[in-house]
Structures are given as C-alpha cells and as structure tokens.
Amino acid sequence: MNRYALAFFAAIGIAGSLPAEAQKPVYKYVYPDGRIVYSDEPVPGARLDAQIEAPPPPDLSKPPPPPPRPAAPAPASDKAPKTLDQAWDQLKLANQRLEEAKSRLESGREPLEGERTGTATGGSRLNDAYWARQKANEAAVRKAEEQARKAQDEVNRLR
C-alpha cells in the first residue's frame, strides 16, 4: 500500500473516530505532478479537487427494524385425499402457494429500510438482515415446490 493511500485511510479513520459535532470534512488535494493528498486543512501548492463527507454516524438510539417474518407455513393435512377431486383441489392450492412464494421472493429483492449498512467510503452494503430475509424467501419457495410436487404425485397416484 503506498503512503498516499495510507494517509487517506488514516485521515478517514481519524475523522470517523471523532464525535459527529467535531468532525471536519476531509479534502482531496492534487499537486501539479499528480500526487494526491487527503487532509482536513489546506495544502500549500496543491489544488483542491474534492470534499469527502464522512458517512453519518449510525443512530444507536433505536435498533434496526426486525426482518419481516416469512409467511406462515401451510397446515399439513394429516389425511391423504380420498378422491381425485380432493387431490386436484390440494394441487391447485399447492400451486397457488408456490406462485405466492415465488412472487414474494421476486418482489423482495429490493432492500428494505434497515437492511443497508453504511461503509467508510460513504457507500453502503447489504447487511445480514437482508440476507436472512432472502434466505427465508428462498426456503419458502423450496418448501412450496416440495408441497406442489407431493400434491402432483398424489393426483397421479389416484388417476
């Protein structure tokens, strides 16, 4: 790692460790020979290129919202259908639940509030709450697929 990158990360680290009201903005300066310097004070002989804002500190007064709970699983029927009509009804219901689970999975790709965490560079990344929600949605689709497959097998058996 070169010394300029090290200086940048040191400046960001120092800026990030200060209380929010005492944080100074960090500036990017460029010397005529192309060298880049990050500083919170003017640098003689260098041109001001950009001001880097520190990401806002996390609001620790309230916890992030919990991830949404997955849909309640379909009650398992303890009796196999006795007629082909009952089996068809169960298959229709299983296919409907499968489509709903797929729809929730597809519409749930966008992160919800509280599912992004700020980074030191001012960006953000998806956090564990987002990935847990995605995993729950994918598990719901797999379970619905299994139930639809079993219902189809039962229809085939009764034919």
Image (cartoon, grey):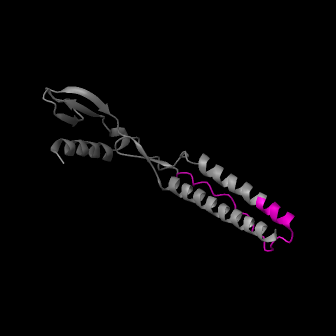
Q: Quadrant of the C terminus?
A: bottom right
The answer to whether residue 90 is above or below residue 25 is below
141 vs 45, nearest the viewer: 141
Query: Quick check: can you spot residue 73?
Result: no
In the figure, is residue 154 to the left or right of 145?
right
| Relative depth, front residue between 86 and 133 | 86
Magenta range: 63-91
Instruction: Evaluate whether residue 2 shows in this view.
Output: yes
| Percent of width and height locating residue 129 | 52, 55
* Total tally of numbered discs in the picture: 0
Closer-to-camera residue (23/36): 36
Magenta span main SS: loop
Q: Residue at x 19, y 35 (%)?
A: 37
Q: Is residue 119 left or right of residue 6?
A: right
- Identified at 73% across, 68% down, the residue is 153
Image position, residue 48 (x, y; %):
23, 26
Residue 89 in magenta stretch: yes
Residue in the picture at 35% in, 35% down: 53
Nearer to me, 55 or 30 = 30
Q: Is residue 86 rendered to the left or right of residue 153? A: right
Which quadrant of the figure has residue 147? bottom right
The answer to which quarter of the image holds residue 28 is: top left
**In magenta segment, residue 80:** yes
Which percent across, then down, holds residue 55?
38, 40
* Residue 104 at x, y percent in the picture: 64, 50
